Amino acid sequence: MPSFSLSPPSQILTKFKQKPTNSSRPCIVQSVLNLCSQGRIREAVDCLELLPSKGLHLDSKSLAFLIQQCGSYKSVKEGKRVHLYIKLATCWTKPRILLVNNLINMYFKFGDDAQARKLFDKMSVRNLYSWNNMLAGYAKLGMIKPAKKLFDKMPEKDVVSWNTMIIAYARNGYYNNALRFYGLLRNSGLGFNAFSFAGVLSVCVKVKDVGLTRQVHCQVIVSGFPLNVVLLSSVVDAYAKSGEMRDARKLFDEMKGRDILAWTTLVSGYAKWGDLKSARELFDVMPEKNSVSWTALIAGYARHGMGYEALELFTRMVLYRVTPDQFTFSSCLCACASISSLRHGKQIHCCLIRTGFRPNTIVVSSLIDMYSKCANLELGRRVFDLMAYVLLSSIYGSLGKWDAVAKVRKLMNERQVKKQRAVSWVEIGNEMHSFSVSDGSHPLKQEIYLALEQLAGQIEDEAAIT
């Protein structure tokens, strides 16, 4: 049954039926698909119960689309309901290969490899796509042993099968196996495509073997495949990671088209190897930047002892309203540690708290390291005590182990470890007012937010002048 907060299925469908459509499908069926296309998965699945009463059902193509949407939106409950609908529908007692393949893919997106395998094993007929679909599911979950076992059992393999194994090995650190499979593919006579280079280039990036990178680069050139920006950016990245910045820059300059990935890759390479002048010059002429681009240069400054430059760039990043990520904050904290600036370190820490940012273990470690190097071991210890509990609680929560979450919080209370809520202050009319994130309870909230807007405007004006 639909939730009390939603309209009844019949009312939802009535609204959609009033809209004209060029589809040859019945209006009710089209309405379900419209809901699904809008991401209203729960309502779409709720409306399935109306179809049998009107002598209607979704065709296999429509069901496949609904299954795909359930997987894309990680709608586990709704996905299982669609699966049950298929089981109960009399005309689908033996689901078509198309539907089973989509169900397998959906369950892998849910992380339920057991249910996916159960469906696969029950298939009376499997095509090559079925095998590759199952193989890709194992690969995406990092389940290398089941993937290899399935690969060995495949009655037929194509270049997709081999590419899947090469990339799976590369992403999970089995570099020798990735190279071995790449060699076997090249000698198999099946041919290869541009995706075949993806896995082996990942290996080049990880092992930083310039000789291997040059071999693969030559193979890319003589292969005759269109040299797309993603493939060339991967080669640039492999050269940059190996420290061969001349080769990386030469290939970058020869690229006919460059996207933000190509620019960021080269900036990151220069920054990593200490050529901050070249990195900054390239960064300044980038036609477009994202958070990764900013963080690459900030990390370079922090890594090479240029803490003030890193913090100045971070300030610009915030003023341009580019959202920092975990690595950005970690790099800024390292910058504070490198110049032993407790004041700047506390400001970064306050920024984390005010924005409600949930730090990962790297950021927490950087916080502790910053306070330690700034000679404030007491604050470092407090961060350690608090974050250890918070991270443990978050891990249990993400796994759905709510009993364990309750035990951790009880332990925090017993040991008097408290998570402080973020509070800010603003002065209005010679009086100091405190407020927290998204606080709407203060009687002068309108005046406070107006003062904050004026303050932000002044900061932006000063940044523009400098």
Image (spheres, rainbow, N blue to C red):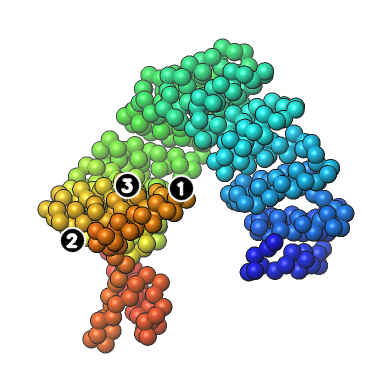
Q: Quadrant of residue 235?
A: top left
Tell me the element at label 2: helix
Q: Which residue is pictured at 36% across the width and 85% down the height?
A: 444
| Residue to which mark 2 is pinned | 343
Q: Quadrant of residue 40?
A: bottom right
Q: Which residue is pictured at 58% across the width and 31% down the height?
A: 136
Residue 172 in view here: yes
In the image shown, does 318 or 80 lie closer to the viewer?
80
Q: Is residue 256 left or right of residue 42?
A: left
Q: Quadrant of residue 35?
A: bottom right
Q: Which residue is pictured at 85% across the width and 58% down the height?
A: 53
| Residue to which mark 3 is pinned | 361
Relative vertical location of residue 323 with respect to residue 164 in this rendering, above or below: below
Q: Position of residue 139 (x, y in %)?
A: 53, 31
Lower position in the chain sequence, tag 3 or tag 1: 3
Cα distance, mark 1 to mark 2? Answer: 37 Å
Lower position in the chain sequence, tag 1 or tag 2: 2
Lower position in the chain sequence, tag 2 or tag 3: 2
